[in-house]
Image (cartoon, grey):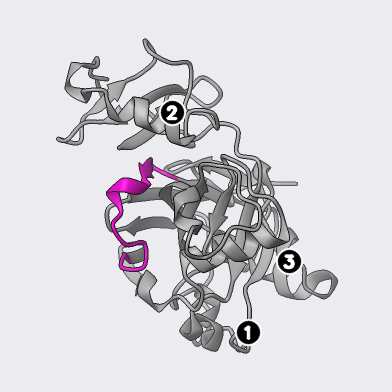
Amino acid sequence: MKLLRYGPAGQEKPGMLDAHGNLRDLSGLLRDIDTGLIAPEGLQALAALDPERLPRVPGEPRLGVPLNGIGKFIAVGLNYSDHAAEAGMPIPGEPILFSKATSCISGANDDVVLPEGSVKGDWEVELGVVIGSLSRGVSEADALRHVAGYCVINDVSEREYQLERGGGQWDKGKGFDTFGPIGPWLVSADEIANPQALDMWLEVNGERVQAGNTRTMIFSVAHLVSYISCCMTLMPGDVIATGTPPGVGMGFRPPRYLKPGDAMRVGIAGLGEQLQSVTNGGR
């Protein structure tokens, strides 16, 4: 299943895609795509629906964040060895964790707004993992059973704030409003046979700058879910951004950073694409 939320910000309705890629309305059956719905029993009930019998949504409405009520937005740093190399950092011996503020989350195609004075805005295509059931100290062998589904994430970053200002603070550099586009939809785990075999890419102004595959992760999805669940209890609706392959702006020589007017296209095989315009704003 491909679950989504559509409509103006703050007024999204629940929906899903049919087999032909048409958007179907779920609002006659449920209030929202929320953390209760993505529990195993909720997904099982949705899987029994025939999307072709649901009302078709006309036009091309805005797609919001595909899940309402995300509790924790946990990110993994340097989880691809070639990305660690381009960043000039050592390959980690165990997962590097940090948090992205939930206030940074936005719809897949919403504008990315650079903070006032930003000169080092950067991009990162990442596989997102959405937790479907409470996970506390789960084994790696059992970890994927706790995953409700997967999604595309652009882990937008401001490298000056992340690495230079205040001695380097990843949460700060990656937590600005609009720096966490998620979607366009949440793809249920049963549709992804192997999360370690997904092509991923990111384009800036039509130029493909990132092209990778989740098979080159240092720590697999199963390992990450298990590891993180031993550090903190994972709740339904928590989202894990699992790291990015090489090709980020700071890895170019000379570095290349985002500027107002740029456009990003971000995609992962089977999970859809995002398209964001870059604008500037103020703080």
Which is nearer the N-term, disc 1 or disc 2?
2
Q: Secondary structure at mark 2?
A: helix
Mark 2 burial class by Cα count in 10 Å: few <14, some 14-19, many 20+: few
The N terminus: image quadrant? top left
Q: Which residues are magenta?
A: 183-199
In the image, is residue 33 above or below residue 30? below
The x and y percentages for residue 22 are: 21, 30
Tell me the SS state at disc 1. loop
Dot in front, 3 or 2 = 2
In this orientation, which residue lies closer to the viewer: 160 or 168? 168
Q: Residue at x 41, y 23 (%)?
A: 14
Image side of residue 257 versus residue 265, left or right: right
Q: Residues within 10 Å of mark 3 (few under 14, many from 20)?
A: many
Instruction: Give the Cα separation between the discs numbered 3 and 2.
Output: 40 Å
Q: Is residue 232 left or right of residue 25?
A: right
For the question of whether residue 267 can be seen, the reply is yes
Q: Which residue is mark 3?
A: 161
Q: Per the image, is 184 magenta?
A: yes
The answer to which quarter of the image holds residue 139 is bottom right
Q: Amino acid at mark 2?
A: Gly
Type of amino acid under label 3: Tyr
Does the stretch in magenta take in 50? Answer: no
Q: Amino acid at mark 1?
A: Gly
Q: Is residue 55 left or right of residue 98?
A: left
Q: Quadrant of residue 63?
A: top left
Which mark's residue is nearer the viewer, 1 or 3? 1
| Foreground of the two, 162 or 237 | 237
In this figure, which residue is indicated by the disc labeled 2? 42
Left/right placement of residue 257 relative to residue 211 reads right
- What is the C-alpha distance between the residues marked 1 and 3? 25 Å
Q: Which residue is mark 1?
A: 93
